[in-house]
Each structure stands twice: as structure tokens, then as C-alpha cells.
Image (cartoon, rainbow, N blue to C red):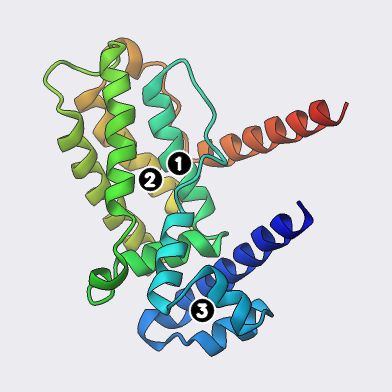
Amino acid sequence: MARQERAIRTRRAVVEAAAAVFAERGYTAATIAEILERAGVTKGALYFHFDSKEALARGVINAQISDDYWVPRELKLQEWVDIGMTLAHRIPKEVILLAGIRLSADLQGRSLFGSAWPAWTQLVTDKLVEAKERGEVLPHVTPRETAECFLGAWIGTQFMSEVVSDWTDLNDRISVLYNHVLPAIATPAALILLDTAPDRGARVVEEAERHRQEALVAAEA
């Protein structure tokens, strides 16, 4: 068990170091040597988990998709809103998310290591399908089309926020995006109940962390 835990920690350290280097220098300029130095691990330890720089990039991209801050809600549309708002809150603070976005936007690199966009599109599609099945979404809405349209707008919004304000206004911009999209897809009964406030992401992250701590305390009791 100790060896397994050590391997998990090493892999995490390598992914975080790679993310930091990719975020700062981009995929092409990043080197394995720099990632090794940043991670503080041996070459053998790195290659045990990742056999190339392309594999490292894929590891960073895949690490974006997690359920660490997903809290179940009665309204599935609120779960969708929470996904976007927590990402907006976390991107300026978490290098793995930042690196994943930059890697996914790398036109040359995508042919080598892919991007996160298909996974995010599927996640949003699934949430919208659930919401439609529960009567929260208007009949004319096609979940896949809406997911792709929204993701394109979300990507553009976050890039604009980076250029204009270094992400300091990202929460506000994503809140505005949801407020423009939701009236076109949500039923009136669901729409009135949705929380799209700019601080929504921060509150959801705090709630998720509180639930995680409570679960740890309960497990130790």
C-alpha cells in the first residue's frame, strides 16, 4: 500500500510540474529536463508513468476532468451551471486547468496529444440530456448541439478574459454567458430557480471541500 501511495504522489507531482512548464512555456518549448527539475523526481520515475512528452501532455489534459468539485443538485441544469462556474473560479488558481486549456488550444500539438474539448462536450451533453429528461429543458433543445455551441462560447469568453483582465473578470463573464444562454433552453419553472451569480463557483468549491472534510471525519470515526 505504501508503494502504491508513493507512486500516486509521484505521478501527481510529475503532472503538476508538467502543467506548470506547459502553462509557462507552451508545449513546443517545454522540455523533459525542465519538467524533471520542477518535479524533483528521477528520469526513471517520470518514465515509469509517462513514456514521452506527448504522454505527459495527455496526462495534464486528462487531469482536468474530475469530480472533485461536483455537488449533486435537484436541478440538473444547476449542476451544469456549477461545472462552468467552478471552472471559472478555479482556472486562475490551478495550473493543471490553465495548462490543459493552453494545450487544447495548441493547433500543432492537438494531433499529438488531443484536447479536452471532446470530454467537456460529452459532459455537458450528458447533463443537458438529464435535465431534458426531468423537464428542465425546452422541447426544441438538442443537447449535443447546445453543448457544442456553449463550449465554443465558453472557450472564447475565457480567452477574452485572459487578454482583457488576466482572468480577474472571468467569473463575471461566465455568469453573463449563462444568463444569455439559459433563457433560450430552460423552462420558465427551472430558469427562475437557477443560481448564476458570479460568486457561484467560489461557493460551490467551498461546499464541496466542506463535504469532503466531513466525509473524512466520518470515515475516521
Q: Does residue 200 appear left or right of residue 115 in this picture?
A: right
The residue at 41%/60% (across/down) is 61
* Amino acid residing under circle 3: Val
**Residue 214 in the image: x percent, y percent?**
76, 29
Q: How far apart are marks 2 and 3 (CA)?
A: 27 Å
Local crowd size for mark 1, using a 10 Å CA cut-off: few (<14), some (14–19), many (≥20)? many
In depth, the one of 18 and 44 nearer the eye is: 44
Give yes or no for contact between labels 1 and 3 (Cβ–Cβ under 8 Å): no
**Can you tell which of label 2 and label 3 is closer to the viewer?**
3
Mark number for residue 85? 1
Q: How far apart are marks 1 and 3 (CA)?
A: 26 Å
Q: Is residue 167 visible?
A: no
Mark number for residue 21? 3
Q: Is residue 73 visible?
A: yes
* Amino acid residing under circle 2: Ile
In depth, the one of 118 and 42 nearer the eye is: 42
**Residue 155 in the image: x percent, y percent?**
30, 55
Give yes or no for contact between labels 2 and 1 (Cβ–Cβ under 8 Å): yes
Q: Does residue 214 appear left or right of residue 172 in this picture?
A: right
Label 2 sits on a secondary structure element that is helix
* Amino acid residing under circle 1: Met
Above or below for 175 versus 105: above
